[in-house]
């Protein structure tokens, strides 16, 4: 009898555990806000090779995290800061093509962010510096009548792992974030 009762309690606990909310990790988000921007798929970067107009151009970071430049072909820039990308391109050019290359890399266009849930026009939108959750929702046409208007979820990939956090509307977002506006109950 006691075993049956314990088994039933464990079964109920297991079933209710599936209904539990996601584990929100807001502390991880705070550490990424001040971190230097790292390049990713969907970014467009401007590469200037001083004295080499044929090599200077705007390049898109592809799905594999690479850009394709003349002479040196594919260069992996995924996960690098712009300074690290400069050094990587300089090293590749120095390897038999240019004697003393000087390279400058800057972000021309950031990868898009996404807005989902209870907004008028869910979708993908271009990122602009200074974006907050509130501005992102405004770009997506605003809240629907059922949208929860006090906070929203952000899903951000941190060290290759998607992490979810729930934040007030004035929280800054980063390129590649997914903002989800939840449905309100009343």
Image (spheres, rainbow, N blue to C red):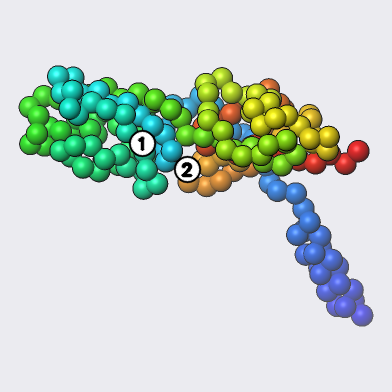
Q: Secondary structure at mark 1?
A: strand
- Can residue 160 be spotted in the picture? yes
Q: Residue at x 75, y 59 (%)?
A: 18
Q: Quadrant of the N terminus?
A: bottom right
Q: Eyeballing the image, is 22 above or below 58?
A: below
**Extreme-bottom residue of the structure:** 1
- Position in image of residue 26 (x %, y %): 64, 35
Along the line of sight, the residue nearer the viewer: 108 or 121: 121
Name the quadrant containing residue 163: top right
Q: Is residue 12 above or below residue 154?
A: below
Q: Secondary structure at mark 2?
A: loop
Across and down, in percent, residue 111 comes to: 47, 34
Where is mark 1, residue-wise?
60
Displayed quadrant of residue 6 = bottom right
Asked if the residues shown at circle 1 and circle 2 are in contact, with their CB atoms under 8 angstroms apart, the answer is: no
Q: CA distance from mark 1 to mark 2?
A: 22 Å
Residue 25 visible in image: no
Q: Which mark is residue 159?
A: 2
Judge the density around disc 2: few (<14), some (14-19), many (≥20) Cα neighbours within 10 Å. few
Badge 1: residue crowd in 10 Å (few <14, some 14–19, many ≥20)? some
Disc 1 or disc 2, which is closer to the eye?
1
The residue shown at (39%, 25%) is 108
Q: How many marks?
A: 2
Q: x, y (%) of residue 116?
A: 67, 41
Judge whether 82 appears above or below 156 on screen.
above
First in sequence: mark 1 vs mark 2: 1
- Foreground of the two, 153 or 16: 153
Is 157 left or right of 77, judged from the image as shown?
Answer: right
Q: Please tell me which residue is depicted at 42% across the width and 34% down the height of the picture.
A: 43
Relative side of 52 to 148, left or right: left
The residue located at (12%, 32%) in the rendering is 94
- Judged left or right of residue 136, residue 95 is left
């Amino acid at each position: 009898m006691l075993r049956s009762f314990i088994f039933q309690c464990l079964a109920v606990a297991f079933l209710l555990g599936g209904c539990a909310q996601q584990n929100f990790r807001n502390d991880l988000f705070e550490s990424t806000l001040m971190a230097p921007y790292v390049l990713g798929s969907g970014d467009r970067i401007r590469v200037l090779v001083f004295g080499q107009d044929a090599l200077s151009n705007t390049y898109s970071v592809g799905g594999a995290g690479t850009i394709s430049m003349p002479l040196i072909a594919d260069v992996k820039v995924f996960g690098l800061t712009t300074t690290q990308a400069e050094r990587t391109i300089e090293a590749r050019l120095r390897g038999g093509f240019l004697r003393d290359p000087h390279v400058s890399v800057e972000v021309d266009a950031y990868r898009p962010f996404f807005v989902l849930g209870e907004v008028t026009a869910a979708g993908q939108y271009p990122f602009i510096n200074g974006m907050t959750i509130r501005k992102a929702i405004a770009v997506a046409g605003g809240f629907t009548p059922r949208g929860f208007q006090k906070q929203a979820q952000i899903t951000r990939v941190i060290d290759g792992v998607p992490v979810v956090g729930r934040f007030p509307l004035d929280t800054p977002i980063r390129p590649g974030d997914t903002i989800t506006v939840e449905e309100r109950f009343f």
